[in-house]
Amino acid sequence: MKHPKTAYILLWFPKPSETFIFREVINLRKMGLPLKVFTLYGKLTRDLSPEMQSISDQVERLGIHFLKSVHADLLHWWKKDRTMMKRILKTFLVRRWRGLEKTGESFWAFLCAFRLARRFEEEGIVHIHAPWASGPATAAWIASQLTGIPFSFTARAWDIYPPDGVLKEKIRDATLVRSETNYNIHYLAKFADGNTDKIHLTYNGVPLNASGEASVSMRPPYRLLALGRLVGKKGYDYLIKTCKILKDSGLDFTLTLAGNGPKKKQLGRLSQKLGLGDRISFPGFISHERVPDLFHSANIFLMPSVVHESGDRDGIPTVIMESLLYRVPVIATNVSGIPELIENGVTGLLVPEKDSPAIASAVLNLLKDKKSAIDMAERGRLTVLEHFDPEKNCQKVLRLYKQYFARAGG
């Protein structure tokens, strides 16, 4: 059976912090899936890898200039199917939308969907997929309602915690729902009205070409590493408080807290307030090409994720997988899907969220038993190789697309 001509809907593409989606697109294309990316926003230019830059122009973007013609798209569909338009408007506009950012994203996706629906018909698209369950899936759902083209979406973290106003309808009408964690599958079942058979686990893939194993010398000064967006759900404020405990215990260590985000200044101020200016460095965004240097020099990788007060949380952070590929021991919190990769005492150490003393105790335990720490990291590396191989996982995705495409009558 031929591969279904597929449209992916994203907010941005390519995006430096979404390498897992970038790799999925690249791998599916290599496997023969005719896949075109459409974005609701404009073009990103900062911090793109050379590979990302090479395909950045192979994307159809809407962006703010789209507003000048939105009335024509709305009028087109109003004339074509007034009953459907009324049903969509009634469903969408009367729902409760949570949070300013999600509300804005959802309403922009609503407007974009009418243009995308026309473009999908013009392009001969037969399958629509949204790699996020929020705005992109809203646009996919509306475009599918208008055109009859089957759609699917992936649920990850921020996009479903808390759920938006039409998550229930999107699950109901999708031919396929992908979840990047088992944890999310149980959560999505609450909104599925019994349609749980369409929800499938598809782990993210991570490039398996780690350039050698880290030495993990476990000699002072011990080098701790954390890497990710500096946002609330990462729990880095608790990590900085952990460093205060470690300093007071007399441990000779440094922490590299790499990444950019809205919390950077706040975290820097906290570090200075606790007298950790000589212990913690904030190098900012680290390009993909420079990431191996961080792992090669690390003794322990820390991921202190928390459930944010908004409900937002991580799925399984890709950087944990990357750390294990370099055989760097991991300490992480037992949040969301993280325990699906980090099994306490087997592939790393798990601690409760928001518990700085527990993180500090875990650090000291790893440092005093190098062999045990590296053995756990090695078992973690084998787990990543088994479950997070990008090609194997993309092959599963492609099989699911073909299976559900055939079921939908394609």
Image (cartoon, grey):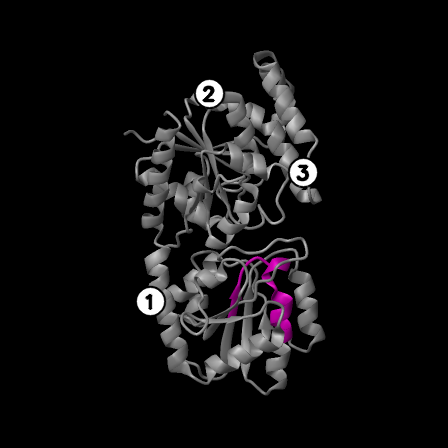
Q: Point out the residue furthest to the top here.
A: 79
Q: Quadrant of the N terminus?
A: top left
Q: Which residue is mark 2?
A: 121
Q: Is residue 303 above or below residue 88?
A: below
Q: Position of residue 92 (x, y in %)?
A: 65, 30
Q: Is residue 42 visible?
A: no
- Image quadrant assignment for residue 299: bottom left
- Image quadrant assignment for residue 103: top right
Please report the residue visible at 52 percent of the width from the left and 82 percent of the height from the top.
364
Q: Which type of secondary structure does the marked residue at label 1 adopt?
A: loop
Q: Is residue 190 visible?
A: yes
| Category of crowding for the residue at label 2, using alpha-carbon neighbours closer than 10 angstroms: few (below 14), some (14–19), many (at least 20) | some
Q: Position of residue 314 (x, y in %)?
A: 55, 56
Earlier residue among tags 1 and 2: 2
User: Residue type at mark 1?
Assistant: Gly
Q: Quadrant of the C terminus?
A: top left
Please report the residue visible at 54 percent of the width from the left and 84 percent of the height from the top.
252
Q: Which residue is mark 1?
A: 212
Q: Position of residue 56 (x, y in %)?
A: 46, 39
User: Residue type at mark 2?
Assistant: Glu
Q: Which type of secondary structure does the marked residue at label 2 adopt?
A: helix
Q: Is residue 307 above or below residue 275?
A: above
| Horizontal side, residue 337 vs residue 41: left or right | left
Q: CA distance from mark 1 to mark 3?
A: 44 Å
Q: Nearer the viewer, residue 309 or 21?
A: 309
Q: Nearer the viewer, residue 402 or 366?
A: 402
Q: Is residue 239 above or below residue 118?
A: below
Q: Which residue is mark 3?
A: 104
Q: Point out the residue furthest to the front here.
A: 194
Please report the residue visible at 45 percent of the width from the left and 28 percent of the height from the top.
150
User: Residue type at mark 3?
Assistant: Gly
Which residues are the magenta region? 225-241
